Amino acid sequence: MIDHDRLFKELLTTCFQDFIELFAPDLAARVEWDSLRFLDKEIFTDVTEGERHEADLIAVARVRGEESCFLIHVENQASKQSEFAERMFHYFARLRSKHRLPIYPIVLFSYDKPRKAEPDFFRVELAGLQVLDFRFHAIQLNRLSWRDYVKHANPVASALMAKMQIAPHERAKVKLECLRLLVTLKLNPARMQMIAGFVDTYLELNREEFQEFNRELAREQPAQREKVVEITGNWARENWHKGQQEGRQEGRRQEASTLILRQLTRRVGPLTKRLESRVQKLPLEKAEALAEALLDFSTRADLEAWLQANAKTVVETK
């Protein structure tokens, strides 16, 4: 099971200023960043559910150019929950009562589904009177397009693109875009490894996607390519080289098949589509064996007999 809370808390704590600058630039402009510090964990009893909750991140900072302070409260919500907006209001009320400071509340909705917009308010009305209108800054990743963030020189963009809207056929491309952006940021090795691990967790590729990733990576400049491979660790390095070897072997197999089909046509005449397909599907070692054997062929029957004798390694087209 993925520990979503730990991964997001590590990312946001390490890259807190980057996160605020990316998603709340007006707020970022008001923060005296040298004064920022995180508060000890706050435990709340949820009056709506009767459960105890720990606030994700609470930071205190001075207003830029002033002596006054305020709080920034960030919650990561990794699953859909009813009455969540009301719970955010209770967090706000408890923090306000305890610290007596202005509070800027932010919620990062990081789940994949559903994609319906989450409310960013909790409102109480009675007899035509609006008793309460509490609002928070909502960031719902599954409603954001990764294309809108790929040009941001920001490590949080590099990480969180992995959780935004991604079409199934774009997964390999987006993973490479995340890592390509990351290597341009000149972060220290620990931060780079942390973000690369975050991307790898949330954009884990299957075999076909990894092959597509390798094809895209092969188009990069050598220096850029090596940096991407380096930050993704030994597993990626091994798979990159393995993918390169497999790609070269497949290229050799296709070249051999093309040459063999030309030679067969000269020796035994035009081949049927079925025979061409069987020759094209031969593994490399069998294709090389056929290249030697065909020197003794004089008819298509000779080819068919050879293919039948080697049927265990030939995948026929039905």
Image (spheres, grey):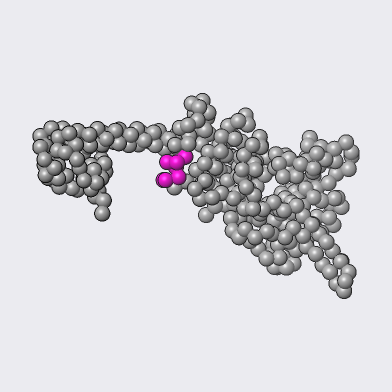
Give the image quarter of residue 286. top left
Most prominent secondary structure in the magenta stretch?
helix
- Which quadrant of the figure contains the C terminus? bottom left
Can I make out residue 169 in this image?
A: yes
Give the image quarter of residue 111. bottom right
In the image: residue 290, left or right of residue 171: left
Image spot of residue 266 (x, y percent): 17, 34
Q: Residue at x 68, y 59 (%)?
A: 117
Q: Residue at x 86, y 50 (%)?
A: 101
The residue lying furthest to the front in this view is 270
Q: Relative to 314, does residue 246 appear above or below in the rendering?
A: above
88 or 51: which is nearer to us? 88
Q: Residue at x 71, y 65 (%)?
A: 83
In the rendered image, residue 251 lying in the magenta stretch gets the answer no
In the image: residue 101, left or right of residue 10: right
Can I make out residue 230 in this image?
A: no
How many numbered dots are placed on residues in this image?
0
Image spot of residue 124 (x, y percent): 82, 67
The residue lying furthest to the top in this view is 223
In the image: residue 115, left or right of residue 310: right
Numbered range of the magenta stretch:
207-213
Image spot of residue 2 (x, y percent): 54, 52
In the rendered image, residue 208 lying in the magenta stretch gets the answer yes
In the image: residue 231, left or right of residue 155: left
Give the image quarter of residue 210. top left
Image spot of residue 125 (x, y percent): 84, 69
The residue lying furthest to the bottom in this view is 127
